[in-house]
């Protein structure tokens, strides 16, 4: 079955558009997914090999935990990010969140909150991964999402080889 163009003429289907065969628009998704998984696999394999950095201990980790505690409880005391009391609910052993704190404008809210949420689900609630790996997990996930988007865009615009170069 052919397609009808604007002038009403029926054209024959292209080789990749026959019934049951993938069309040319589905290939960029598969390529982008493959490249993103190739990025994500080694990142997840070494996720627990790295400890906390000084800037995250003074910024993203404590602020994220306090913001998540506010979202859970609605207690406005958690919004004063310079305070140490009340302490957010965490599973031990956990990072010491009572260190010196950065000013709030040094901290990326989405990164801090996603880090805390990942730790809360994967460590505090489920105990699947250690707390450091749980805090680090959003970074490679967001990175893989970016690699997927760039590869997909490049595959649609400049083809497979360009997408492989752009996504790597």
Image: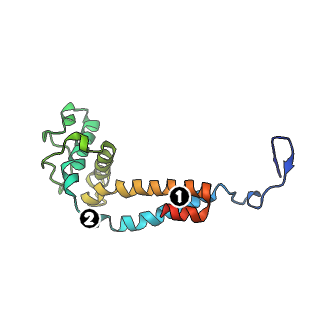
Front one among 90 and 78:
78
Instruction: Give the percent coordinates (x, y) of residue 112.
Output: 29, 46
Q: Is residue 7 left or right of residue 96?
A: right
Question: Total of numbered circles in the picture?
Answer: 2
Q: Is residue 121 left or right of residue 157?
A: left
Instruction: Give the percent coordinates (x, y) of residue 39.
Output: 44, 64
Q: Residues within 10 Å of mark 2 (few under 14, many from 20)?
A: few
Q: Which mark is residue 97?
A: none
Task: Report the residue marked by disc 2.
Answer: 50
Q: Is residue 80 above or below residue 143?
A: above
Picture colour scheme: rainbow
Q: Nearer the viewer, mark 2 or mark 1?
A: 1
Instruction: Give the percent coordinates (x, y) of residue 103.
Output: 19, 41
SS assignment at label 2 = loop
Q: Earlier in the sequence, mark 2 or mark 1?
A: 2
Q: Is residue 129 left or right of residue 32?
A: left
Task: Report the residue marked by disc 1.
Answer: 151
Front one among 61 and 159:
159
Alpha-carbon distance for marks 2 and 1?
28 Å
Q: Is residue 70 left or right of residue 29?
A: left
> In terms of image quadrants, where is residue 26?
bottom right
**Residue at 30% from the left image edge and 57% from the top image edge:** 136
Instruction: Give the percent coordinates (x, y) of residue 52.
Output: 22, 59
> In terms of image quadrants, where is residue 64?
top left
């Amino acid at each position: 079955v052919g397609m009808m163009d604007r002038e009403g003429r029926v054209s024959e289907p292209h080789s990749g558009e026959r019934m049951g065969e993938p069309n040319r628009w589905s290939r960029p998704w598969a390529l982008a997914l493959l490249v993103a998984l190739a990025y994500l696999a080694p990142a997840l394999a070494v996720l627990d090999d790295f400890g906390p950095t000084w800037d995250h201990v003074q910024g993203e980790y404590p602020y994220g935990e306090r913001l998540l505690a506010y979202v859970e409880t609605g207690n406005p005391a958690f919004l004063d990010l310079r305070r140490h009391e009340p302490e957010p609910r965490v599973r031990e052993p956990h990072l010491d969140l009572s260190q010196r704190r950065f000013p709030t404008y040094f901290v990326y809210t989405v990164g801090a909150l996603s880090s805390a949420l990942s730790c809360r689900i994967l460590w505090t609630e489920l105990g699947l991964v250690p707390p450091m790996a749980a805090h680090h997990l959003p970074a490679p996930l967001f990175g893989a999402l970016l690699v997927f988007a760039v590869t997909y865009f490049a595959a649609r615009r400049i083809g497979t080889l360009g997408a492989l170069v752009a996504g790597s």
